[in-house]
Image (cartoon, helix red, strand yellow):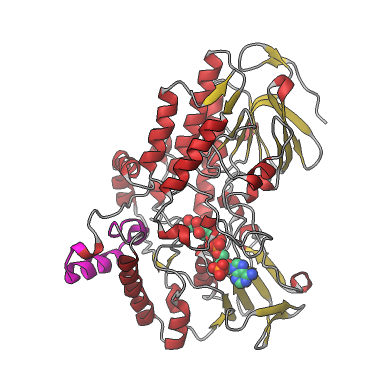
Amino acid sequence: MNQPQTHLDSTGSEAEFDFDAIVIGAGVAGLYQLYRLRGLGMRVRVFEAGTGVGGTWYWNRYPGARFDSESYSYGYSFSQELLDEWDWSEHFASQPEILSYLQHVADKFDLRKDIQFSSDVKAAVYREETNSWQIELQDGSRYTSRFLITGIGLLSQPTLPKIPGIESFQGQSFHTSRWPHEPVDYSGKRVAVIGTGATGVQTIQEVCKTAGHLTVFQRRPNWCAPLHNAKIGPEEMQSIRESYDEIFKTCGNTAAGFLHTADPRGTFEVSEKERYEFWEHLYASKGFGIWQGNFKDVLSDRKANKAMSDFVADKIRERVDNPETAERLIPKDHGFGSRRVPLETNYYESYNRSNVELVDVTATPIQEITPDGIVTTDRSLEFDIIIYATGFDAILGSYNRIDIVGADGRKLRDQWQEQLSTFLGIQVNNFPNLFMILGPHALLGNNPRSIEFNVEWIANLLEYMRTRGLVRAEATIEAVASWYEHVLEQGKDLLINEIDSWMTGVNSNLEGRDKRIVARYSGTQQTFRKRCNEVVEGGYAELNLQ
Ligand code: NAP
């Protein structure tokens, strides 16, 4: 255990805390939170489980991993110098480039000196008598701070399928988000991929290029749409740089912070010709336009959604040579955009290759994994490599794995088991001085935009507290209850909340997670920010400040 030091805390009084604030996670959120709090003169320590910075982009090194949003809309916006000096090489940057970017940010702002790597937080206990947190790492070392801030991600706790014999496999096997740091060679190898979400799609379309043979185990197909990635040359980068103000302004005005936002027209308000021309245009355009920039009712009106789904189904039929395979790749249990749309580059054409096979595990379920491969109800297949693209214990998993103990001794996971509720996705009653960046019931969407907003909101609150000599902040039960009602209200009538997916908290690989829950905020960026800003303008009346 380290020795506590006596120092002046953020209120200027003498206290025995190791730090003013502890931040968990050195990803996009944690790095910026450190930067902002340091700017307030606070003593901050970031604890990061990995050996380097980057969070999501540190862990997800699987083949083909890249942004699904335009690179220039997905970086930080807070530093003009950073915007001026960083060149993106592609409209949708690959993971190695994104990781280099975040490493550059850490170096540029000299952040590493306050980050402790290979430090996985095991427990965090609130200590009422001193209004402070004590955190414990897996190695048993303990540290104290006034404030605790989590930047632990919403898709960071991987889940493996519950398949008998999974441990027995003798070849190489990886979950996509726990990919080795050294290169994996697929050439000539027999490779299996289980899972066809956004991660599986990116992996499959890349691995098929070099694998000897690739077998894709698909349970439910997703509606995928073309990414249309392209290189960015120096002149284009210059023009992007000159447009940064406009780019971030656009992101600030759209519903979910992306460069795309819903078209004000209804699907059937236009002629059939116009409708299909618009959809052809979206299908030929870059990024999430087809999902976020579609007719205003495509994600809420069943008839509109069906027409759009039929349009995309026909595209899949056009692109996949084998009609039976095409039908298996067309979702039948949900409409377009009611789960997160994976963006792809020749994903459907992957199934036209002679070295790629699609196995439908709803028709022939996987029975077991053996030392040699995978056995379905139909046959036994041998593999050299198995890739699990099976997703995450989303939103809650990264919190539930830490013993976070509140003022009354109750654990956060137990409190949330009774009722998942937060205030703005940032605070929770009974957990004073704990602030979450993109916690449950926070706005997601374009995450870096949401992260910057949340980080600044937290930093402003801490500054407010410091100038008033306040040492304890806790959302009131009433504020939490009212945010919960608001979250439920905003989620009504959206098809996305009526479908099993990580967004509705369903995960077949976890016990007791077969029922849909409301785990995220479905309102717009404008409603979310308005409420957050009102809280500030009202002098944080929803928080009990002492
Ligand atoms: P996911 O969307 O949850 O997909 C997991 C996949 O594994 C699904 O196809 C699922 O099938 C399948 N699966 C899970 N357990 C299985 C089992 N026991 N047997 C057979 N199949 C099983 O996870 P993800 O693809 O990792 O993506 C999660 C999220 O991460 C995305 O939605 C996105 O928000 C984010 N992401 C972002 C990017 C990007 O921005 N570039 C890239 C990748 C991911 P079912 O559908 O039947 O459950």
Across and down, in percent, residue 171 comes to 73, 74
Q: Is residue 356 above or below residue 429?
A: below
Q: Quadrant of the C terminus?
A: top right
In the shown orientation, is residue 305 left or right of residue 438? left
Q: What residue do we see at 69% from left, 25% from top? A: 132
Q: What residue do we see at 81% from left, 24% from top? A: 3
Across and down, in percent, residue 47 comes to 67, 37
In the shown orientation, is residue 65 left or right of residue 283? right
Q: Is residue 298 visible?
A: yes
| Picture quadrant where residue 229 is located | bottom left
* Residue 279 forms part of the magenta stretch: yes
Give the magenta range.
269-296
* Residue 265 forms part of the magenta stretch: no
Q: Is residue 475 above or below residue 164?
A: above
Instruction: Choose between 346 and 296: the one closer to the eye.
Output: 296
Instruction: Choose between 65 and 97: the one closer to the eye.
Output: 65
| Picture quadrant where residue 160 is located | bottom right
Q: What residue do we see at 43% from left, 76% from top? A: 330
Across and down, in percent, residue 95 comes to 52, 55
In the shown orientation, is residue 361 left or right of residue 339? right
Task: Give the total number of marks visible in the rendering.
Answer: 0
| Picture quadrant where residue 544 is located | top right
Instruction: Choose between 243 and 482: the one closer to the eye.
Output: 482
Across and down, in percent, residue 33 comes to 54, 33
Dominant SS type (magenta): helix
Instruction: Choose between 489 and 444: the one closer to the eye.
Output: 489
**In which quadrant of this rendering is ligand 1 seen?**
bottom right
Q: Is residue 79 visible?
A: no
Q: Quadrant of the N terminus?
A: top right
Q: Is residue 145 above or below residue 76?
A: above
In the shown orientation, is residue 204 left or right of residue 244? right
